[in-house]
Image: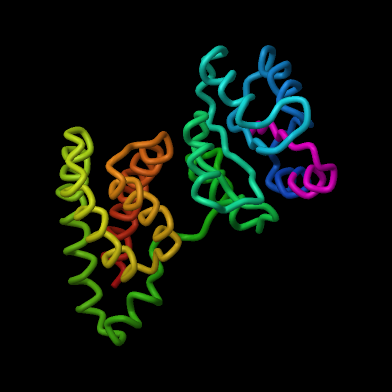
Amino acid sequence: MSILLVEDNIINQMVAKHTLELWEAKVTLADDGQKALDILTNEQFDIILMDIQMPEMSGLDATRIIRNKMHIRTPIIAMTASAMQKERQNCYDAGMNDYFSKPFEPADLNEIIHKYLGGNQAVATDKLINMPNLMKVVDNDAEAARDILKVFIGSVPTVLDKVRSHRTAEDFKLLFTDIHNLKNSIGILGRWDMNEMLSDIETDITAKQFTPGTHTNLDLLEQQLQQLKTEAEVEFKKI
Protein backbone atom coordinates (compact mmCIF):
# COMPACT_ATOMS: atom_id res chain seq x y z
CA MET A 1 0.00 0.00 0.00
CA SER A 2 1.16 3.52 -0.73
CA ILE A 3 0.60 6.20 1.90
CA LEU A 4 1.11 9.95 1.85
CA LEU A 5 2.03 11.02 5.38
CA VAL A 6 1.51 14.77 5.90
CA GLU A 7 3.06 15.73 9.23
CA ASP A 8 5.36 18.57 10.28
CA ASN A 9 6.66 17.14 13.57
CA ILE A 10 9.85 15.20 12.89
CA ILE A 11 9.43 12.77 15.78
CA ASN A 12 5.83 12.03 14.76
CA GLN A 13 7.08 11.49 11.21
CA MET A 14 9.69 9.01 12.38
CA VAL A 15 7.29 7.02 14.56
CA ALA A 16 4.51 6.83 11.96
CA LYS A 17 6.88 6.06 9.09
CA HIS A 18 8.61 3.31 11.08
CA THR A 19 5.30 1.71 12.03
CA LEU A 20 3.91 1.85 8.50
CA GLU A 21 7.07 0.45 6.93
CA LEU A 22 6.95 -2.51 9.32
CA TRP A 23 3.73 -3.35 7.46
CA GLU A 24 5.57 -3.02 4.13
CA ALA A 25 3.86 0.24 3.20
CA LYS A 26 5.49 2.66 0.81
CA VAL A 27 5.51 5.99 2.69
CA THR A 28 5.95 9.42 1.12
CA LEU A 29 6.47 12.36 3.50
CA ALA A 30 5.24 15.95 3.27
CA ASP A 31 5.77 18.37 6.16
CA ASP A 32 3.02 20.85 5.26
CA GLY A 33 -0.21 21.04 3.29
CA GLN A 34 1.24 22.81 0.27
CA LYS A 35 3.94 20.19 -0.19
CA ALA A 36 1.25 17.53 -0.02
CA LEU A 37 -0.64 19.27 -2.84
CA ASP A 38 2.53 19.45 -4.93
CA ILE A 39 3.12 15.72 -4.47
CA LEU A 40 -0.50 14.87 -5.30
CA THR A 41 -0.27 16.61 -8.68
CA ASN A 42 2.09 13.85 -9.81
CA GLU A 43 1.45 10.82 -7.63
CA GLN A 44 -1.49 8.70 -6.49
CA PHE A 45 -1.84 7.03 -3.10
CA ASP A 46 -4.05 4.44 -1.44
CA ILE A 47 -4.56 6.61 1.64
CA ILE A 48 -3.54 10.03 2.99
CA LEU A 49 -2.73 10.57 6.68
CA MET A 50 -3.10 14.32 7.30
CA ASP A 51 -2.02 16.33 10.33
CA ILE A 52 -4.38 19.19 11.18
CA GLN A 53 -2.09 21.91 12.54
CA MET A 54 0.85 22.67 10.24
CA PRO A 55 2.75 25.78 9.11
CA GLU A 56 2.24 27.29 5.64
CA MET A 57 -1.02 25.40 5.03
CA SER A 58 -3.13 23.47 7.53
CA GLY A 59 -4.44 19.98 6.94
CA LEU A 60 -8.00 21.29 6.75
CA ASP A 61 -7.13 23.84 4.04
CA ALA A 62 -5.15 21.25 2.10
CA THR A 63 -8.05 18.79 2.27
CA ARG A 64 -10.52 21.37 0.94
CA ILE A 65 -8.28 21.93 -2.08
CA ILE A 66 -7.77 18.19 -2.60
CA ARG A 67 -11.53 17.60 -2.57
CA ASN A 68 -12.91 20.72 -4.24
CA LYS A 69 -10.23 21.76 -6.72
CA MET A 70 -8.16 18.65 -7.41
CA HIS A 71 -11.22 16.35 -7.12
CA ILE A 72 -9.17 13.56 -5.55
CA ARG A 73 -11.29 10.99 -3.69
CA THR A 74 -8.48 9.14 -1.91
CA PRO A 75 -9.41 8.47 1.75
CA ILE A 76 -8.00 11.22 3.97
CA ILE A 77 -7.54 10.43 7.65
CA ALA A 78 -6.94 13.30 10.07
CA MET A 79 -4.22 13.00 12.69
CA THR A 80 -5.09 15.26 15.60
CA ALA A 81 -4.06 15.80 19.20
CA SER A 82 -7.59 17.01 19.96
CA ALA A 83 -10.47 14.61 20.53
CA MET A 84 -13.06 17.37 20.83
CA GLN A 85 -16.29 16.99 18.87
CA LYS A 86 -15.84 20.38 17.19
CA GLU A 87 -12.42 19.41 15.83
CA ARG A 88 -13.82 16.14 14.57
CA GLN A 89 -16.69 17.91 12.82
CA ASN A 90 -14.23 20.35 11.21
CA CYS A 91 -12.43 17.36 9.72
CA TYR A 92 -15.63 15.97 8.20
CA ASP A 93 -16.71 19.39 6.93
CA ALA A 94 -13.38 19.82 5.14
CA GLY A 95 -13.88 16.48 3.35
CA MET A 96 -11.87 14.10 5.50
CA ASN A 97 -13.18 10.58 5.95
CA ASP A 98 -12.08 9.89 9.50
CA TYR A 99 -9.57 10.76 12.21
CA PHE A 100 -7.39 9.24 14.90
CA SER A 101 -5.71 10.81 17.90
CA LYS A 102 -2.04 11.49 18.50
CA PRO A 103 -0.03 10.05 20.09
CA PHE A 104 -1.34 6.87 18.50
CA GLU A 105 -1.16 3.19 19.33
CA PRO A 106 -0.02 0.95 16.44
CA ALA A 107 -3.23 -1.08 16.83
CA ASP A 108 -5.31 2.06 16.21
CA LEU A 109 -3.37 2.88 13.07
CA ASN A 110 -3.64 -0.75 11.96
CA GLU A 111 -7.41 -0.70 12.41
CA ILE A 112 -8.00 2.53 10.51
CA ILE A 113 -5.86 1.42 7.56
CA HIS A 114 -7.72 -1.89 7.45
CA LYS A 115 -10.99 0.06 7.62
CA TYR A 116 -10.28 2.05 4.46
CA LEU A 117 -8.12 -0.23 2.37
CA GLY A 118 -9.53 -3.66 3.13
CA GLY A 119 -8.85 -6.69 0.97
CA ASN A 120 -5.31 -7.78 0.20
CA GLN A 121 -3.86 -4.35 0.91
CA ALA A 122 -4.95 -4.33 4.52
CA VAL A 123 -2.74 -5.05 7.48
CA ALA A 124 -3.30 -8.60 8.66
CA THR A 125 -5.87 -8.88 11.46
CA ASP A 126 -7.17 -11.66 13.69
CA LYS A 127 -10.27 -13.67 12.93
CA LEU A 128 -13.48 -11.72 13.05
CA ILE A 129 -15.42 -13.95 15.43
CA ASN A 130 -14.18 -14.50 18.98
CA MET A 131 -15.34 -18.08 19.52
CA PRO A 132 -13.93 -18.36 23.07
CA ASN A 133 -16.12 -15.42 24.04
CA LEU A 134 -19.19 -16.99 22.45
CA MET A 135 -18.54 -20.31 24.21
CA LYS A 136 -18.14 -18.44 27.50
CA VAL A 137 -21.48 -16.70 26.97
CA VAL A 138 -23.25 -20.06 26.48
CA ASP A 139 -21.27 -21.80 29.26
CA ASN A 140 -19.55 -24.10 26.72
CA ASP A 141 -22.85 -25.41 25.42
CA ALA A 142 -21.97 -26.33 21.83
CA GLU A 143 -25.59 -26.71 20.75
CA ALA A 144 -26.45 -23.26 22.08
CA ALA A 145 -23.46 -21.80 20.24
CA ARG A 146 -24.63 -23.45 17.02
CA ASP A 147 -28.12 -22.02 17.51
CA ILE A 148 -26.75 -18.49 17.99
CA LEU A 149 -24.54 -18.75 14.91
CA LYS A 150 -27.45 -20.13 12.87
CA VAL A 151 -29.73 -17.25 13.88
CA PHE A 152 -26.99 -14.70 13.18
CA ILE A 153 -26.25 -16.19 9.74
CA GLY A 154 -29.94 -16.09 8.84
CA SER A 155 -30.41 -12.54 10.13
CA VAL A 156 -27.59 -10.81 8.23
CA PRO A 157 -29.35 -10.50 4.83
CA THR A 158 -32.45 -9.03 6.49
CA VAL A 159 -30.40 -6.62 8.60
CA LEU A 160 -28.43 -5.44 5.57
CA ASP A 161 -31.63 -4.89 3.58
CA LYS A 162 -33.08 -2.80 6.39
CA VAL A 163 -29.93 -0.71 6.82
CA ARG A 164 -29.69 -0.04 3.07
CA SER A 165 -33.36 0.85 2.81
CA HIS A 166 -33.43 3.15 5.84
CA ARG A 167 -30.15 4.74 4.80
CA THR A 168 -31.45 5.52 1.31
CA ALA A 169 -34.70 6.91 2.68
CA GLU A 170 -32.79 8.82 5.39
CA ASP A 171 -35.16 7.35 7.95
CA PHE A 172 -32.96 8.23 10.92
CA LYS A 173 -35.30 6.76 13.54
CA LEU A 174 -35.44 3.27 12.02
CA LEU A 175 -31.77 3.34 11.04
CA PHE A 176 -30.85 4.14 14.66
CA THR A 177 -32.86 1.09 15.77
CA ASP A 178 -31.06 -1.08 13.19
CA ILE A 179 -27.63 0.00 14.41
CA HIS A 180 -28.51 -0.16 18.09
CA ASN A 181 -29.82 -3.72 17.80
CA LEU A 182 -26.60 -4.81 16.10
CA LYS A 183 -24.53 -3.93 19.16
CA ASN A 184 -25.80 -6.86 21.21
CA SER A 185 -25.32 -9.41 18.43
CA ILE A 186 -21.83 -8.21 17.62
CA GLY A 187 -20.90 -8.10 21.31
CA ILE A 188 -21.89 -11.74 21.77
CA LEU A 189 -19.60 -12.63 18.85
CA GLY A 190 -16.76 -10.81 20.61
CA ARG A 191 -16.44 -7.88 18.22
CA TRP A 192 -16.28 -5.10 20.84
CA ASP A 193 -13.85 -3.22 18.57
CA MET A 194 -16.82 -2.39 16.32
CA ASN A 195 -18.66 -0.58 19.14
CA GLU A 196 -16.89 2.73 18.52
CA MET A 197 -17.84 2.65 14.85
CA LEU A 198 -21.45 1.80 15.71
CA SER A 199 -21.52 4.56 18.33
CA ASP A 200 -20.21 7.05 15.78
CA ILE A 201 -23.00 6.07 13.39
CA GLU A 202 -25.56 6.43 16.18
CA THR A 203 -24.24 9.90 17.03
CA ASP A 204 -24.58 11.09 13.44
CA ILE A 205 -28.03 9.54 13.10
CA THR A 206 -29.18 11.19 16.32
CA ALA A 207 -28.06 14.51 14.86
CA LYS A 208 -30.02 13.61 11.72
CA GLN A 209 -27.10 14.12 9.39
CA PHE A 210 -24.87 12.00 7.18
CA THR A 211 -21.23 13.07 7.06
CA PRO A 212 -18.58 11.51 4.79
CA GLY A 213 -17.55 9.55 7.88
CA THR A 214 -21.09 8.22 8.36
CA HIS A 215 -21.25 6.87 4.82
CA THR A 216 -17.79 5.34 5.18
CA ASN A 217 -18.77 3.66 8.46
CA LEU A 218 -22.01 2.33 6.97
CA ASP A 219 -20.10 0.92 3.98
CA LEU A 220 -17.60 -0.68 6.35
CA LEU A 221 -20.40 -2.07 8.51
CA GLU A 222 -21.92 -3.78 5.48
CA GLN A 223 -18.55 -5.25 4.51
CA GLN A 224 -17.83 -6.52 8.02
CA LEU A 225 -21.29 -8.03 8.46
CA GLN A 226 -20.79 -10.00 5.25
CA GLN A 227 -17.41 -11.18 6.54
CA LEU A 228 -18.89 -12.08 9.91
CA LYS A 229 -21.61 -14.10 8.18
CA THR A 230 -19.03 -16.01 6.14
CA GLU A 231 -16.93 -16.79 9.17
CA ALA A 232 -20.00 -17.73 11.23
CA GLU A 233 -20.84 -20.29 8.54
CA VAL A 234 -17.33 -21.76 8.86
CA GLU A 235 -17.49 -21.89 12.67
CA PHE A 236 -20.99 -23.39 12.56
CA LYS A 237 -19.66 -26.38 10.62
CA LYS A 238 -16.81 -26.88 13.10
CA ILE A 239 -18.96 -27.19 16.21
As drawn, the residue found furthest toward the right would be 10
Q: From the image, which quarter does the N terminus lie in?
A: top right
How is the model colour-coded?
rainbow
Residue 54 image point, x, y percent: 74, 34
Image-based side of 121 in relation to 239, left or right: right
Residue situated in front as seen by the camera: 117 or 204: 204
Residue 50 image point, x, y percent: 65, 35
Quarter of the figure with residue 194: bottom left
Residue displayed at 26% across by 54% down: 179
Q: In this picture, which residue range is highlighted in magenta?
A: 1-16
Quarter of the figure with residue 30: top right
As drawn, the residue found furthest toward the front would be 86
Residue situated in front as seen by the camera: 145 or 113: 113
Query: In the displayed structure, would residue 75 be above or below residue 186?
Result: above
Residue displayed at 40% across by 64% down: 191
Q: Residue 69 magenta-drawn?
A: no
Residue displayed at 35% across by 82% down: 136
Residue displayed at 51% across by 45% down: 86
Q: Residue 9 magenta-drawn?
A: yes
Image-based side of 62 in relation to 205, left or right: right
Residue 8 image point, x, y percent: 79, 37
Image-based side of 87 in relation to 39, left or right: left
